[in-house]
């Protein structure tokens, strides 16, 4: 473990001048996506995150059908000035029940932000993401409507989720983009081919979601015993045959963790932070958890030094991952590149 090098008290500059904590918190875990959640426990976890220095809180209007934003509103009532708040629009439906539509038209952008502001109990959103791409609407139209929200003072910075490199360039021609949020981890590296280089060239930060492989990289997830309502059952790489093959990447992560006296989660997050430095852009992962103790564990990644040999071993393991990261390839940037 590193010593005086710790970054816990620092901030990271994403694009467009947005400063956030070096790790964020993914709020989706506090809705019934991976199983039932106790709201009181969820609120305690959020408070612990901010107490520990994780002030970049990420949610979306569809998490829990809006209930996740309402949960975070309880945190914001007491601690709004301590939080950099991110939320998203565009998807219609819920992660657990499925999505019925994607909307990026200007009228929907205006409706969605007002609904989110009401649920969140705040008058401004620090980072507002287009959650997924509505292919029926030119992205310049969607981002143009989002830019109007900045002018109106409802939103401070704009973000995009799961966009291709060209979509990012088109969007940035309309308004500065602070961050791209897409899945990125040791076992999900497709964004490195096109999207990450485009973001680096444009001065856009990257916010990896599912940086722990939806829990798989921690070595604590048995894909064969996922609950009936666990949406990971629909993801090809969690299928029995693929999950068995993918255990090799977990074994590689655990081996490095054992060498460092760390945990697999810390190694997976530290790898992403190093990868951002190697590829020339700010990277702020947003692991989600229901347990306060996991927040403290995740923060240990900021103190971890990976050797070149360990990085080589992790890179090699990632090349052997089996199965798509999405049930629908067009749903994510990889399927549209």
Image (tube, rainbow, N blue to C red):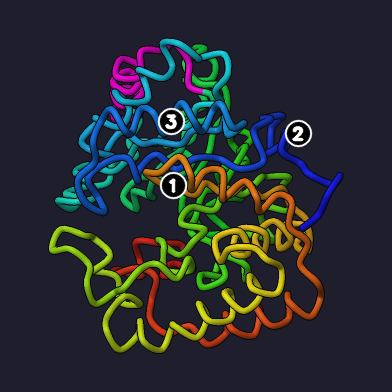
Q: Residue at x 48, y 65 (%)?
A: 218
Q: Against 65, is 213 above or below?
A: below
Question: What SS does tag 3 mark?
Answer: helix
Lower position in the chain sequence, tag 1 or tag 3: 3
Query: What is the quadrant of residue 104 in the picture?
Result: top left
Measured from the top left, where is residue 290 in percent x and y?
37, 43
Which is more toward the observer, 288 or 169? 288
Q: Crowdedness of circle 1 by 10 Å Cα count: few (<14), some, many (20+)? A: many
Query: To which residue does mark 2 refer?
Result: 10
Q: Crowdedness of circle 3 by 10 Å Cα count: few (<14), some, many (20+)? A: many
The overriding secondary structure of the stretch rendered in magenta is: helix
Q: Are marks 2 and 1 in contact (CB under 8 Å)?
A: no
* Real-space CA distance between mark 2 and mark 1, rounded to the nearest whole angstrom: 20 Å
In the rendered image, residue 118 lying in the magenta stretch gets the answer: yes
Lower position in the chain sequence, tag 2 or tag 3: 2
In the rendered image, residue 20 lying in the magenta stretch gets the answer: no
What segment is highlighted magenta in the picture? 107-125
Give left or right: position of 205 versus 331. right
Query: To which residue does mark 1 refer?
Result: 288
Q: Residue at x 41, y 11 (%)?
A: 77
Q: Against 259, is 132 above or below?
A: above
Give the position of the N terminus as an image quadrant. Answer: bottom right
Q: Residue at x 50, y 14 (%)?
A: 79
Which is more toward the observer, 280 or 247? 247
Measured from the top left, where is residue 294 in percent x and y?
48, 48
Q: Residue at x 36, y 87 (%)?
A: 244
The total of numbered circles placed on residues is 3
Q: Residue 14 — which label? A: none
Measured from the top left, where is residue 33 in percent x and y?
25, 50
Lower position in the chain sequence, tag 2 or tag 1: 2
Query: To which residue does mark 3 refer?
Result: 46
């Amino acid at each position: 473990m590193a010593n005086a090098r710790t970054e816990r008290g620092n901030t990271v500059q994403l694009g467009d001048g947005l400063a956030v904590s070096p790790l964020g918190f993914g709020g989706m875990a506090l809705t019934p996506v991976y199983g039932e959640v106790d709201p009181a426990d969820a609120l305690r976890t959020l408070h612990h995150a901010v107490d520990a220095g994780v002030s970049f809180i990420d949610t979306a209007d569809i998490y829990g059908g809006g209930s996740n934003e309402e949960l975070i509103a309880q945190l914001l009532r007491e601690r709004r000035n301590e939080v950099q708040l991110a939320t998203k629009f565009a998807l219609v439906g819920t992660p657990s029940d499925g999505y019925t539509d994607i909307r990026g038209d200007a009228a929907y952008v205006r409706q969605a932000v007002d609904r989110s502001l009401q649920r969140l109990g705040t008058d401004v959103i620090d980072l507002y993401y287009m959650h997924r791409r509505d292919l029926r609407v030119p992205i310049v139209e969607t981002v143009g409507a989002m830019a109007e929200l900045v002018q109106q003072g409802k939103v401070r910075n704009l973000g995009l989720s799961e966009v291709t490199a060209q979509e990012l360039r088109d969007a940035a021609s309309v308004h500065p983009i602070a961050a791209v949020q897409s899945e990125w981890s040791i076992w999900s590296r497709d964004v490195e081919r096109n999207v990450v280089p485009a973001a680096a060239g444009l001065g856009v930060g990257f916010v990896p979601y599912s940086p722990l492989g939806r829990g798989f990289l921690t070595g604590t997830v048995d894909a064969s015993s996922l609950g009936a309502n666990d949406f990971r059952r629909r993801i090809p790489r969690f299928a029995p045959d693929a999950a068995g093959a993918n255990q090799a990447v977990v074994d590689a992560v655990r081996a490095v963790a054992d060498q460092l006296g760390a945990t697999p989660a810390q190694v997976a997050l530290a790898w992403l932070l190093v990868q951002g430095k190697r590829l020339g852009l700010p990277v702020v992962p947003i692991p989600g958890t229901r347990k306060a103790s996991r927040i403290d564990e995740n923060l240990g990644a900021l103190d971890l030094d990976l050797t070149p040999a360990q990085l080589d071993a992790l890179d090699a393991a990632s090349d052997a991952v089996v199965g798509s990261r999405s049930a629908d390839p067009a749903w994510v940037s990889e399927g549209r590149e």
